[in-house]
Amino acid sequence: KSATETYNLLTEVYGDQCLSRTQVFKWFKKFMGGRKNVGNDPKLCRPSTAKTPENVEKVARIVRRDRRLSIRAISELTNINKESVRFQQWKIRMERCRDRGGDYKLVH
């Protein structure tokens, strides 16, 4: 069967709920190329190396030493990107609050 024939059969069976013609053609090409299932492909992103236990402890030590340091300063001292430092600072504050028996509330 061709992609067009497959699309026509799917439209006949599923009607308005059928995938678009473009999507049917994309999936047809994938299955003709050897694909066996419709599950998600594995992600090809880089693993997170900034949130390792060692880096979390490194940031925690720096924050305990001087809580007034900016995220940029901590980032430069540890060679960890600013967003990872920001997340780790938030996590440290949340854990500190929890350890003191309080609820950590986000303020917008």
Image: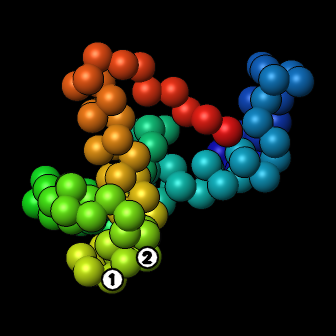
Q: Is residue 56 visible to us here?
A: no
* Measured Cα–Cα span from mark 1 to mark 2: 6 Å
In this view, 30 is above or below 99: below
Question: Which quarter of the rendered picture does the C terminus lie within?
Answer: top right
Judging depth in this view, the residue of 58 and 19 nearest the camera is 58
Judging depth in this view, the residue of 77 and 100 nearest the camera is 100
Q: Quadrant of residue 59?
A: bottom left
Asked if residue 73 lies left or right of residue 5, the reply is: left
Q: Residue 96, which numbered label?
A: none
Which residue sits furthest right?
16
What's the amino acid at mark 1? Glu
- The chosen color scheme is rainbow
At 65% across and 45% down in the image, what residue appears?
1
Q: Quadrant of residue 26?
A: bottom right
Q: Position of residue 79 (x, y in %)?
A: 27, 80
Q: Position of residue 19 (x, y in %)?
A: 76, 36
What's the amino acid at mark 2? Arg
Q: Residues within 10 Å of mark 2 (few under 14, many from 20)?
A: some
Q: Position of residue 71 (x, y in %)?
A: 42, 68
Q: Are marks 1 and 2 in contact (CB under 8 Å)?
A: yes
Q: Position of residue 105 (x, y in %)?
A: 51, 27
Q: Which residue is mark 1?
A: 76
Q: Residues within 10 Å of mark 1 (few under 14, many from 20)?
A: few
Which residue sits furthest left?
54
Secondary element at image label 2 = helix
Asked if residue 87 lies left or right of residue 63, the reply is: right
Q: Residue 72, which numbered label?
A: 2
In this view, 89 is above or below 66: above
